[in-house]
Image (cartoon, rainbow, N blue to C red):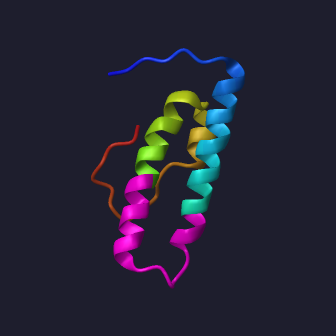
Amino acid sequence: MLGILISEGEKEEIIYLLKREMEEILFDMDDSRVEQIIKQAMEDRYRTLFSLFKRVASQQDCAKYIPLFKRNSKNFS
């Protein structure tokens, strides 16, 4: 486990970057040209990003990005 001290401005920048990455993945997941194996990797990346996001974002922000993928075997609460 690692700990990190960041300023409020740095926290907001991290939130912004994570939101942008997650939104891009969600957009690409709807593209029918993307192969299923790639979508699986994108889903795994999204779950990792969301795990980081929920550590710095408010509950209200997190609610907008809760993963709603087919696999529900992992706990994200």
Residue 15 percent location from the top left of the image? 63, 36
Q: Position of residue 2 (x, y in %)?
A: 37, 20
- Would residue 13 be counted in the magenta stretch? no
Magenta stretch, main secondary structure class: helix
Residue 20 position within the rendered picture, expressed as x and y whole percent measured from the top left = 64, 51
* Image height of 29 relative to 33, above or below: above
The part of the image, by quadrant, that contains residue 75 is top left
Residue 35 coordinates in the image, percent (x, y): 41, 80
User: Could you tell whether 56 is left or right of 69 in the image?
Assistant: right
For the point 61% across and 30% down, which residue is it? 58
Give the quadrant of the C terminus.
top left
From this view, report whether residue 27 is shown above or below residue 53. Answer: below
Looking at the image, the residue that sits furthest to the left is 73
In the image, taking residue 43 as reference, residue 9 lies left or right, namely right
- Which of the 4 image quarters holds residue 63? top right
In this picture, is 42 found above or below 36? above
Furthest-right residue in view?
Answer: 9
Give the number of callouts: 0
- Would you identify the image quadrant in which residue 13 lies? top right
- Front-lying residue, 68 or 51: 51
Residue beneath the point at 56% across and 63% down: 26
Seen in the image, is 75 located left or right of residue 31? left
Q: Nearer the viewer, residue 62 or 22?
A: 22
Quarter of the image for the N terminus: give it: top left
Q: Is residue 16 left or right of residue 75?
A: right
Let me know if residue 29 is in the magenta part: yes
In the image, which residues are magenta? 26-45
